[in-house]
Image (cartoon, grey):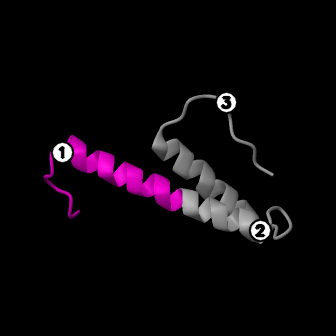
Amino acid sequence: MITPVNKPQTSVGIIKSINKALKEANKDPFLYTDDEIRTLKRKKRQWQDLERRANIEDRKGFGQYI
């Protein structure tokens, strides 16, 4: 099981660690339960949405359809 690090991370770092955990879960099906995998995928979508909204705010609305 991959445990989170206690250092403050950016949203990109959190998304990468979730991706790593999901990849490990695909390799070893007994690493996480189905509920935990569902939770990881939900959190990944939430963080990606947060990152996308932050990028739109940084660009003041320009380039949001990239």
Q: Is residue 65 left or right of residue 27?
A: left
Secondary element at image label 2: helix
Secondary element at image label 1: loop
Q: Is residue 28 left or right of residue 14?
A: right
Q: Position of residue 60 (x, y in %)?
A: 15, 45
Question: Circle 3 sits on which residue?
Answer: 6
Q: Position of residue 13 (x, y in %)?
A: 53, 43
Residue at point 18% right, 45% down?
59
- How far apart marks 1 and 2 lie (CA) works out to 38 Å
Say whether disc 1 or disc 2 marks the residue closer to the N-terminus: 2
How packed is label 3: few (under 14 Cα within 10 Å), some, or many (20 or more)? few
> What segment is highlighted magenta in the picture?
44-66
Q: Is residue 19 left or right of residue 30?
A: left
- Identify the residue at the far top of this view: 7
Find out whether the residues at labels 1 and 3 contact each other: C-beta distance under 8 Å: no
How packed is label 1: few (under 14 Cα within 10 Å), some, or many (20 or more)? few
Nearer to us: label 1 or label 2: 1
Q: Is residue 55 left or right of residue 14?
A: left
Residue 60 lies in the magenta-colored region: yes
Residue at point 73% right, 67% down?
35
Question: Which quadrant of the figure has residue 18?
Answer: bottom right
Task: Identify which amino acid the numbered label 1 is placed on.
Answer: Arg
Task: Identify which amino acid the numbered label 3 is placed on.
Answer: Asn
Check residue 59 in the rendering and tell me which mark sits there, or answer none: 1
Say whether disc 2 or disc 3 marks the residue closer to the N-terminus: 3
Find out whether the residues at labels 1 and 2 contact each other: C-beta distance under 8 Å: no
How packed is label 2: few (under 14 Cα within 10 Å), some, or many (20 or more)? few
- How far apart marks 2 and 3 lie (CA) works out to 25 Å
Question: Which SS type dominates the magenta stretch?
Answer: helix
Question: Circle 2 sits on which residue?
Answer: 27
Q: Position of residue 65 (x, y in %)?
A: 20, 64
Q: Is residue 24 above or below residue 34?
A: above
